[in-house]
Image (cartoon, rainbow, N blue to C red):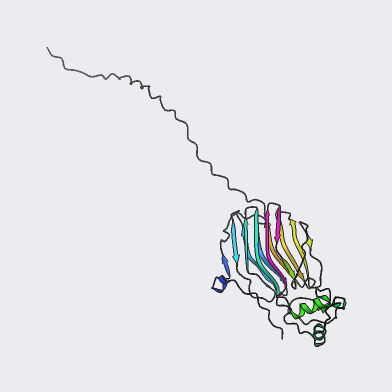
Amino acid sequence: MRRQLTPTVLTAAAVAGVVTFSLVASAPAGNAAARPSSAYAVSAEGQVPIPKTPYAESLDGKRQTTSALELPKNPLLSVRAGTATAGNDSASVELFDIVVGPDILSQVQIPPELKQQCASLPKTGAEDLPLPDIALPDLGLPLPKLSTKDLPVKNLPDLCNLLLNPPTSLLAIDSLNVYCSGDSGGVDLGTITLLGQTLKLPSTKQGASLPSNPLAAISVNSQGKHSDGSFTITGLSINLGGGAEVINLASATCAKPAAKPKPTPKPTQPDVQAPPVDHVPAAPVPTPVKTHQPVTG
């Protein structure tokens, strides 16, 4: 029976009862552009689909922020915290403690003959011993059929250490930050490990790929401009099983700046000049009044 993999332990705040998805600000209706500025922390397509979570969108240029403490329960992916922010011609994402394939190797049953080999390794010269080609069981993830030769190890002692002391995940990233402004952006990536081994990150600024291996194909800092003038940058794209599962981590899209509303012109009034302070206006000319008076004498 396939054992369901469980996500990593939540933060203390989550255990205390903090709502899994906390909406900090929602995007109000406004003048929508062709493609508004937006950002999301995690999404996945394939056998284990995950919607864009958390997701922020700015329809009118006002700053919008959304946060989440964890993803919906699934056997593929877990995160400790994620925040997505979108504004006027800007967007950013912050992610912490991303785990792909939690406890993936803890369920592997080591064959007795391999255990015996590992127990009898000589103190010197063991690095020259060939790797055994032993099929691995179904690990509950969208991965191809694997054997011990597909694991990222160089020699038999490394393989013994990997299987006897399995790491807590297939892939782990301690932090990932992505940002864009206008038609440019950047990625800040913390330590990334594949089955417990730290990967060397490429020094290139854009469109790099980590060393290919049978477990995962990983692209770093993918960037692209769209026909409507917007710009998208994605921190990490992880391809499992030759396209069976594609995970995107930390993606930000910067749209063209939202149009500012034109101010309503105020009605104009004719200028009335006030008389000088020291000028006294002339008195009106008296109008004669005709009348009859009685005669006396």
Residue 234 in view (yes/no): yes
Q: In the rendering, at what x and y percent does residue 19 appear?
A: 55, 70
Q: Quadrant of the image for the N terminus? A: bottom right
Is 171 included in the stretch rendered in magenta?
yes
Q: Foreground residue, 176 or 60?
A: 176
Q: In the rendering, at what x and y percent does residue 212 appear?
A: 82, 68
Q: In this view, does 271 lie above or below 39?
A: above
Q: In this rendering, would 64 be left or right of 230?
A: left
Q: Foreground residue, 79 or 36?
A: 79
Q: Quadrant of the image for the C terminus? A: top left
Q: In the rendering, at what x and y percent does residue 61 appear?
A: 61, 53
Residue 37 in view (yes/no): no
Q: In this rendering, would 224 be left or right of 134?
A: left
Q: Is residue 60 above or below residue 41?
A: above
Is 160 included in the stretch rendered in magenta?
no
Q: In which quarter of the image is residue 245?
A: bottom right
The residues colored magenta run: 167-190
* Furthest residue in direction top, as rendered: 297
Residue in the image at 56% along x and 74% along y? 15
